[in-house]
Structures are given as structure tokens and as C-alpha cells.
Amino acid sequence: MRRVRDEEKRLVAGCLAAALALALLAWAVYHAEGVRHLDARLLAHLSADRDGRLGDLAGPVADLGNPLPQVLLLLAGVAVALAADRRRAAVAGVVLVLGADLTTLVLKHELAAPRLDPVLGWAQVGEDSFPSGHATAAFAMAAAWALFVPPRRRCPVAAVGFAIACLAAAAVVVLRFHFPSDALGGLLVAAIWAAIAALRCPSKPGKQPRNAG
């Protein structure tokens, strides 16, 4: 029981830390001139080959964050959890993905504002780019799948999912759809909801009732 309480405390602390980091990042990208300029310079450097071979490779990877692939991945994950009679994990994963995606949509709307920088020239990024929806979706799905699978498989599944999500987040920067800070913001949104979902889905097999999933 004490181990469970310690785990819950760590999850709550992680959630609060991610929320604070997201708030500080949002303030910095809109109000700190040095951060804005650094963000733009990184974007210009990383997206220099967006019309070349790197951009061609980034396109299909970025598409992993589109609605249709995400819906299919979510349904497959729910099926995996339910097949193992892990209903709580199925619900937690769905809440994670939908909560993260909805949070990003709200933040995009509320924080929409120009983030112009001369280094980008004519190819500026849209006003509602923070946080990145594709990055949020990819990282949230990776975390959800870590819940869908049995606890003994969480580490390898989480590692693979996180690697794929990083590629998807990098792809939208390479294509100049988002600033690097937008992708980081998507990661933080997903981290907040991952901690919330994990509070309802213990990591140890013995922590759940047998019929709770």
C-alpha cells in the first residue's frame, strides 16, 4: 500500500511539473524575445531541406498524427486491452488521448497570436500553432499504448511508441508546420494527461482487482 501511495505522489508531482513547464514555455514563446528568436532560428535550420529528400521522408511520418491513423491506433489499443479483460486500462487510454487532444485544441484557440521572425522570411508559421496537435496526438497515443498492454510489456512498448512520436514531432518541424517549441508543448500536454491516466491504471499487476481491467 505504501508503494502505491509513493507511486501516486510521483505521478501527481510529474503532472504538476509538466503543467508548470507548459505554462512557462507558453509564456516564453509569446513574450520572451530571445526565446522567440531562438525558436525561429532552430526552425529555419531544421526545415532547411523541407523541399528536398528530408521533406519527402517527413511527410508520411507527420501523417501518423492525422485523425484517421490516430483513431485506428486508438481502436486497436482498446481492443488489445479489452481482450485481456483490462477495462480500466482501456478507459484510461481513451481518456488520455481525448483529454490531451482536447486540451491542445483549447490552447491553440486561446493562445493564437502572431509569432513572426525575420529569419523565417515569407514562410512564417500559423498563429495557432502552439501546441502542436500532431505532436500531442503522437505522444499521447504512445503513452496510451503503454497502458493498453499488460504491465510486463509497458517498457518496450513505451520505448518504441516514444521513438515514433519523436519522429512525428520532428517531422512537423522539418516541414515547417510548427516551431520546435510547439512540438515540445505537445509533449508536455501529453505528459500531463499520461500522469492523470496512470493514476487510474496502476503499473503493478497486483494493484488492480481481477475484474477491473
Image: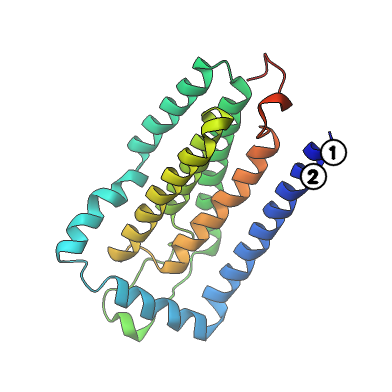
Judging depth in this view, the residue of 118 and 140 nearest the camera is 140
Is the Cβ of the residue at disc 1 closer than 8 Å to that at disc 2?
A: yes
Q: Is residue 193 visible?
A: yes
Residue under label 2: 6
Measuring from the top left, give residue 135's x and y in whole percent: 43, 53
Judging depth in this view, the residue of 208 and 185 nearest the camera is 208
Disc 1 residue crowd, few under 14, some 14–19, many 20+, Cα 10 Å: few
The kind of residue on which mark 2 rests is Asp
Residue 120 falls in image quadrant: bottom left
Q: Residue furthest left?
A: 52
Q: Residue at x 41, y 44 (%)?
A: 160
Q: Residue at x 50, y 86 (%)?
A: 34
Q: Residue at x 57, y 68 (%)?
A: 26
Where disc 2 sits, the SS reads: helix
Measuring from the top left, give residue 202's x and y in whole percent: 68, 33
Tell how many labels: 2
Where disc 1 sits, the SS reads: helix
The kind of residue on which mark 1 rests is Arg
Residue under label 1: 2
Q: Is residue 108 visible?
A: no
